[in-house]
Image: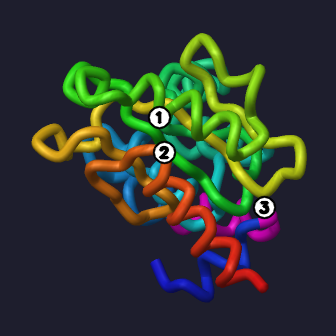
């Protein structure tokens, strides 16, 4: 997707148009629901509730079926994400290399402390950061791994994470 198209839809505006395009592109193929949902989230940043009936009609599914798929997969968001989405790998390899301590540090540094237990995303009080536990970012040989936005980072410890966040904050000044 083009960056301009992605940026224009981040607030949910135009989501119905994005859904219509995705439906036109995928509905005649086998198993179209997941590719449609992925496309909408890629462009809009999340799956707005108002497109669920549109997708259901377009695929001849019930709204409950579409909602069930959205709610089943942790990847899909139903609310706009924070400015910076941080995914911390909590799979076995990363755990063996200190991911649990790193996850605690990430939660404190981003203001998410006290939230995000039970494997769910947590948004910091100031709304800048959203922390999501994930179970494998594919960097097992270079654990622990973190993804900030769309950028993967390997062998991350607390001080390296702080440097990454400091760089993000410097870019915004």
Residue 32 lies, in percent from the top left, at 37, 44
Snapshot colouring? rainbow
**Contact between labelled residues 1 and 2, with CB atoms less than 8 Å apart:** yes
The picture quadrant where one finds residue 108 is top right
Residue 15 lies, in percent from the top left, at 71, 62
* Direction front: furthest residue: 159
Where 173 sits versus 139, above or below?
below
- Direction from residue 102 to residue 68 in the image, left or right: right
Mark-to-mark CA distance, 2 and 3: 34 Å
Task: Name the residue that disc number 3 marks.
Answer: 12
Where 164 sits versus 98, above or below?
below
**Contact between labelled residues 3 and 2, with CB atoms less than 8 Å apart:** no
Tell me where the magenta segment starts and ends, as one range.
11-21
- Direction from residue 62 to residue 88 in the image, left or right: left
Are there few (<14), some (14-19), or many (20+) residues within 10 Å of tag 1?
Answer: many
- Observer-nearest of 19 and 170: 170
Q: Earlier in the sequence, mark 2 or mark 1?
A: 1
Q: Is residue 15 magenta?
A: yes
Task: Name the residue that disc number 2 marks.
Answer: 158
Are there few (<14), some (14-19), or many (20+) residues within 10 Å of tag 3?
Answer: some
How many labels were placed on the picture? 3
Please tell me whether mark 3 or mark 1 is closer to you in this view.
1
Q: Earlier in the sequence, mark 2 or mark 3?
A: 3
- Observer-nearest of 150 and 75: 150
- Direction from residue 91 to residue 151 in the image, left or right: right
Q: Is residue 32 magenta?
A: no
Task: Name the residue that disc number 1 marks.
Answer: 102
- Direction from residue 106 to residue 112 in the image, left or right: right
Q: Give the residue displayed 51% in from the left and 64% down from the top.
A: 164
Please tell me whether mark 2 or mark 3 is closer to you in this view.
2
Q: Give the residue displayed 61% in from the left and 88% down from the top.
A: 4
Are there few (<14), some (14-19), or many (20+) residues within 10 Å of tag 2?
Answer: some
């Amino acid at each position: 997707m083009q960056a301009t198209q992605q940026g224009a839809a981040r607030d949910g505006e135009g989501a119905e148009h994005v859904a219509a395009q995705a439906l036109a592109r995928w509905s005649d193929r086998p198993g179209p629901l997941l590719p449609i949902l992925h496309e909408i989230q890629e462009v809009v940043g999340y799956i707005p509730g108002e497109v669920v009936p549109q997708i259901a009609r377009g695929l001849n599914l019930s709204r409950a079926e579409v909602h069930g798929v959205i709610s089943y997969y942790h990847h899909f968001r139903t609310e706009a994400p924070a400015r910076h989405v941080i995914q911390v790998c909590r799979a076995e390899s990363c755990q063996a290399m200190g991911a649990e301590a790193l996850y605690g540090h990430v939660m404190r540094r981003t203001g998410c402390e006290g939230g995000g237990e039970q494997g769910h995303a947590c948004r910091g009080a100031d709304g800048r950061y959203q922390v999501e536990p994930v179970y494998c970012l594919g960097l097992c040989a270079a654990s622990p791994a973190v993804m900030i936005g769309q950028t993967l980072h390997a062998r991350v410890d607390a001080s390296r994470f702080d440097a990454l966040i400091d760089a993000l904050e410097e870019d915004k000044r």
